[in-house]
Amino acid sequence: MAKIKTQTGRRAFIKNTSLASGGLVLGFSMLNSCKPKDAEKMVAREMPEEWFEINAYLRIGDNGLVTIMSPNPEFGQGVITSMPMIVADELDVDWQDVLVEQANFDQEDYGWQFTGGSQGIRRRWEGLRMAGATAKQMLIAAAAETWQVSASEITVSGGVLSHQASDNSAGYGEMASVAAKLEVPEEVNLKEVKDFTIIGTSKKSVENHKIVTGKPLFGLDYQFDGALVAMVAHPPAFGLQLKSFDGSQIKSMPGIVDVFKIKTLEDGFTRGYFDTNAFTDLVAIVGKTTWEVMNAKKQLNVDWEPIADSKFKMDRFGTEMEVDVPSGLESTEDHYAQMNEMASKSSTTARKDGNPEEVFKTAAKIIERSYSCPFLAHNCMEPMNFFAHVTDEGAKLAGPLQAPVLTAPTVAARLGIPAEKIDIELTRMGGGFGRRAYGHYAVEAALISREAKAPVKLVYTREDDMTCGIYRPSYRADYKAALDENNNLVAFHVKAGGIPETPLFANRFPAGAVDNYLAQHWEINSNITIGAFRAPRSNFMAGVEQAFLDEVAEAAGKDPIEFRLELLQRAKDNPVGEENEYDPERLAGVLKLVREKSNWSQVPSGTHRGVSAYFCHNSYAAHVVDVTMDGNTPKVENVVCALDCGIVINPDAAANMAEGAIVDGVGNAMYGNLSFTDGKPDQTNFDRYKMIRHSEAPKNIEVHFVQNEIDPTGLGEPPFPPVFGALANAIYKATGRRHYNQPFATDKPPLVG
């Protein structure tokens, strides 16, 4: 049984408070936990009927019910269920006696409220366990004091405390008020993994019933008496800005209340890392209904003008930097030409092992390939929206937001009010994928409300969402591999860049497995705004790296899985370099598991099979994709997925997340494409930007998890990147043609040189 201290340094990790109602309250500040970088607070207390307080609470009522507030924003990844499961398991309460609620933003109580980077469970694992374990230990102490027996003789099961010798027993509710008066223990016992009763079992989402019955959960569902509807008009192209507008004509249209300009970020403002905002000068239209505002927006007269080269300051989590924004109207054709040019030039070296240049000169075989991908739009099914009501007393905001902890300071600075006067209610998100980590639309809603002097709900159209930026960047990667006369991989070179960032991970596989290794990178600046897109950078690099490794394996005359395993064995037994990010044994583990579960060597007639494996976000994923041909069209029949993400909290939900990532990956690899002509996105809605259809999704997906006792790592993103490579490799087996440019369905962008 693991023992963990409840205090760190001078500041207590846990404080307890007694309520008049007799409930038990425990406050947990992750800022002072054993992992100071993690930030959260969990509290336990009785839930009176009139309870409405917005805070991080574990509540034990006198009837034995437990209410657990889930601290992180929820957008389908399941933390609203899995996080309370962790607390409930250490508390030793029956899951049927647990009520779950979404906590709202409260930095003092929760600290780092951020859903992204596949870090939710990983960062809160220890703190959530401590919350449940401490409450249980105090309840045991309360029972021991009440019955005048030794605490060590008391057992707990399903929220019931028992003392066999005296034949005493009591539910948690009966002991809550006594426990609240006790001192918080200096250390608590955490369960051994083998003793988990809730963690590792499958639980249905606590919001399923609300979702299927149409209960108001999402930002678009949010209602507020007297709220108006707002929309914004932004420049039609990157490289343009607002010059002037005439709102007089639309002010007289039915339902229109006002038309005015807003400036989301003041000149000279030091932006946070997630304050990405392509268009800071906007025209806001405010009216009574969505339909009326949409019609008025179509009639708005606006003049736009070219931007000049500019700069702004950014605080990247404590590091101040200056960002250049170039002028000009950019086009995809020019982008590819620029990337071709950059690929032919010398680049910045990120890592070099051995002497790859010399080895390439004498190699028996050399394989060289180039890969590219376009910009991608996130296309959350729920368009961007946010509610705001700004008054002299403060600001009430509500909506779908991945990172309220990062948005609140910007809202406070822009409104010129203290952060403590901003209340943000977190609604469920209808998709996020990184897009909703950028809270500019919340800032816009707040500014519109203040100017309109009314509560407003800002709503983006699909066209607004797809044309205002924050895309997955366009990337290019060039690979070169050398084989000796025995078909051993003896040198490896990767050069990668993009617009406007590089996707390179210099220290990931096959770094560490090749004696002579070179990784280089470059970037091309742009005024097109980009941002995190499910598994940033990995979503490109995994696909192209794994497709290239298949070609190298083919040139070496080796089975693709065996070829990878040989390299991983080298990285394990005799690694090259000391900065390798991945654990070769765990990466090999998912390859071996997917080989077994897919019956790799037993390929059904008419089926063509591809494999891929990748490490990102602290976890390991491998896929085997089976493709058949329907005429000239490849169809994904079956996908077998193997994952090593440590302890799995909720297996069914985890499998669902992997299934969603796989479908998402197939769709983006086959169809995802956003192009530009003179700064204007060519695809503005789903009639031109193709999303995967049900008939195009894999017919069957199997998900298997490596069983271990490693603390949980990432899961939302790791299953996504390997899909691209496994699909490319399967299509090659089916058609004899390799794809070097995404999307595969068209493969029509200007070919990389």
Image (cartoon, rainbow, N blue to C red):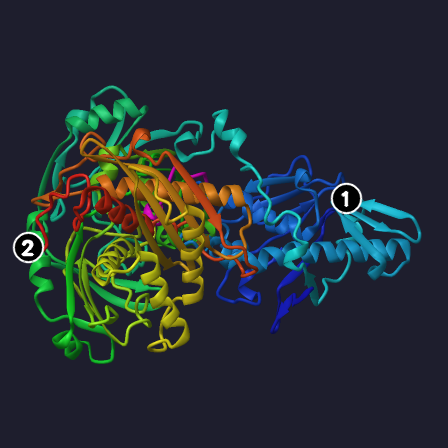
Query: What is the magenta range?
Result: 425-438
What residue is shown with label 2?
337
Q: Is residue 116 left or right of residue 628?
A: right
**Type of amino acid under label 2:** Ala
Query: Magenta stretch mostly in which secondary structure?
Result: loop
Q: Nearer the viewer, mark 1 or mark 2?
A: 2
Residue 478 inside the magenta-drawn segment:
no
Farthest residue, direction top: 254
Residue 417 at x, y percent in the picture: 40, 52
Q: Is residue 41 left or right of residue 590?
A: right
Identify the image quadrant of residue 493: bottom left
Residue 391 visible to the viewer: no
Residue in the picture at 32% in, 71% down: 513
Residue 539 at x, y percent in the picture: 29, 52
Q: Is residue 421 above or below residue 682?
A: below
What residue is shown with label 1?
173
